[in-house]
Amino acid sequence: MVMEKLMEDLKTQIVEQLNLQDVKPGDIGNDDPLFNEGLGLDSIDALELIVLLQQHYNIKLLNAEEGPKVFYSVRSMAEYITTHQKANP
Amino acid sequence: MYICGTGIISPQPSFGHGPFLEEMAEHRGEEMRCIEPEYKDLLDPKLIRRMSRIIRFGTAAAMDCLKEAGWNSTDAIITGTAYGCLEDTGVFLSRLVEFKEQMLTPTAFIQSTHNTIGAQIGLSLKCHSYNNTFVHRAFSFEHALLDAWMLFKEGQADNALVGAADEITGYSQAIIRRFGIYRKCESNFTLFEKGQKGTMAGEGASFFALQKQAGGKEYAKIDAIKTLLLENPAAGTMETEIQLFLSAHSVSITDLDLVLLGYNGDFSHDAALHHLASGMFEDSITSGFKQYCGEYPTSSAFALWMAANICKNNSLPSSMGGIGLEGFVRVLIYNVDLLGHHSLILVSSC
């Protein structure tokens, strides 16, 4: 339930932060790829998502190589947030 | 330099080459904002979401200009802007304060630089040729034109996309308003009512497809450009400068069909222009242009768009009386701002 709520929050935050004009939070599937064939995000959006994690969840992505895995989908982002919030409550 | 295409987004319904200023759009208050088209049909939707208003209307005006000229690319993209991308600058600086210089988002920073419009046009066209932006206050557009002129003279380009853009934002209005420059007008129709203090702020983007040589599609020609920085010039100075400018290009005042003067509605600013209109231009048709576009540093680009279309149509627009001009048409634009930036642009029909 907590995970579901986190994913819904993330969808709203992604739409707002990236100004996705024709996309509603409900249009984004939990497992849809965010980059390339999915929402079609690009490298500037990746930077915006890193800032989103910092601003909303106080999580710094220190290892850039983790990026593609963390930002693959809304679910992967939510799992990363959950893991890091447990590690640094 | 020959004009073979224009594109403009202004406070008038000027986008898309419809009827040329048939009716003047009315604006009330202290600002005249652009009438903007639906951008989804003109720009890549993926890019639109990152673009602030000035980038949207600047890029869309440039694309419309290229469309009229029938160009897919160009030898040079030259832009003039005095204020640059103010909205994103405001967003970036606000976040800088709000987040204590931490966690700054990249988009507002990337899009806040003055050369963003020129860069977006280049990216949209995949054009890697010369790309320069001039930020010279109220000479920004004129210097962009002069740059194209020099590129042509030096043989470095045969054509160039040259334009200007400036925007009104809440931030800029709040700051500039404190100088007492603006007044709340009942309507831009009455902007030039005598004895009033203050003007209306304006904004817009105008682009021109310029060619070094005539190619058959051109409809106007820029014969000469001159800029003069003169704060409170002595009586008679501008008359002399205008005479010198015209005679250097073998033009006399009687050759001018129309003089577009940069009246902005403020009595102290306009006094010298009224003096010219009733003096050296007594026998010419004179008109203002800021009743259409408002006062902003690159407003001479709007005047050039008007002049080019008057040359194209051989007549003044209906909203200016619709007077027909016989044969070869010659228009002088004289713009001046509050800081003493005087510019002269001589335009003729082809």
Image (tube, coloured by chain):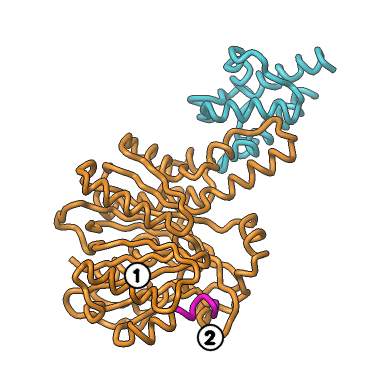
Chain colours: A cyan, B orange
The percent coordinates of residue B202 (x first, y second) are: 52, 65
What's the amino acid at mark 2? Lys
Pointer 1 local density, CA inside 10 Å: few below 14, some 14–19, many at least 20: many
Residue lying at 58% horizontally and 26% vertically, measured from the top left: A46
Residue lying at 65% horizontally and 18% vertically, measured from the top left: A76
Q: Which residue is mark 1?
A: B333
Q: Which residue is mark 2?
A: B194
**Please, what secondary structure does the residue beneath circle 1 have?**
strand
Q: Earlier in the sequence, mark 1 or mark 2?
A: 2
The percent coordinates of residue B155 (x first, y second) are: 20, 43
B328, above or below B228, in the image: below
* Chain part drawn in magenta: B266-272
Nearer to me, A34 or B337: B337
Q: What chain does badge 2 belong to?
A: B
Q: Are marks 1 and 2 in contact (CB under 8 Å)?
A: no
Q: Main secondary structure of the magenta part?
A: helix
Asked if labels 1 and 2 share a chain, the reply is yes
B37, above or below B268, in the image: above
Image-based side of B51 in relation to B103, left or right: left
What's the amino acid at mark 1? Ile
Residue lying at 62% horizontally and 61% vertically, measured from the top left: B176
Please identify the quarter of the rendering in which residue B120 is found. Answer: top left
B158, above or below B253, in the image: above
Residue lying at 54% horizontally and 72% vertically, measured from the top left: B27
B124, above or below B243, in the image: above
Nearer to me, B260 or B92: B260
Q: What chain does badge 1 belong to?
A: B
The percent coordinates of residue B161 (x first, y second) are: 31, 49
